[in-house]
Image (tube, grey):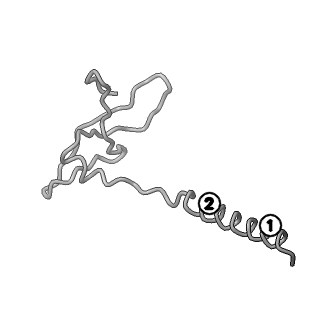
Amino acid sequence: MSLPVFRYTIHIAVSLFAVAVLAACGSSGPKVVPQLHLTCQTVECECRGEKTSLFSDRETTEILWRLNGDASCPKGFVLERVSIDFLGRRR
């Protein structure tokens, strides 16, 4: 092989390796469910039901606290963090 062809081959090999590494790092693995039962001990959370309509708010209920301090929700509700905007209003 002549020198220019060898350099061209090396550039292609390095480029393909870099693309493969970046693709492997950028792929998202399985979505990790946050452990809100622990987070809700220090951050405001609430139990929300499923959204039934586009124009209605989701039903909420009180959090059930276990003896060990973990938060949980009744059946049919999901534990979620409360998001608050810059004016202090709940979303």
Residue 77, image quadrant? top left
- Of all residues, the one furthest to the front in this rendering is 3
What is the spatial separation of the Cα atoms under label 2 and label 1, in whole angstroms?
23 Å
Do labels 2 and 1 touch, CB within 8 Å?
Answer: no
- Of all residues, the one furthest to the left in this rendering is 67
Q: How many residues crowd around disc 2 within 10 Å: few (fewer than 14), some, or many (20 or more)?
A: few
Q: Quadrant of the C terminus?
A: top left
Q: Which residue is mark 1?
A: 8
Secondary element under disc 2, as helix, strand or loop, is helix
Secondary element under disc 1, as helix, strand or loop, is helix
For the point 25% across and 24% down, the residue is 88
Residue 63 x/y as whole percent: 23, 43
Residue 19 x/y as whole percent: 66, 61
- Of all residues, the one furthest to the right in this rendering is 1
For the point 34% across and 38% down, the residue is 48
Residue 32 x/y as whole percent: 42, 57
Instruction: Inspect the image, locate mark 1, and give the three-letter code of the amino acid beneath it.
Output: Tyr
Q: Which residue is mark 2?
A: 23
For the point 22% across and 42% down, the residue is 43
Instruction: Inspect the image, locate mark 2, and give the three-letter code of the amino acid beneath it.
Output: Ala
Q: Judge by depth and name the residue closer to the eye, 23 or 3.
A: 3
Residue 38 x/y as whole percent: 24, 53
Q: How many residues crowd around disc 1 within 10 Å: few (fewer than 14), some, or many (20 or more)?
A: few
For the point 56% across and 57% down, the residue is 26
Q: Judge by depth and name the residue closer to the eye, 42 or 14.
A: 14
Q: Quadrant of the N terminus?
A: bottom right
Tag in front: 2 or 1: 1
Indicate whether 37 appears above or below 87: below
Indicate whether 44 appears above or below 9: above
**In the rendered picture of this protein, how many numbered marks are placed on residues?**
2
- Of all residues, the one furthest to the bottom in this rendering is 1
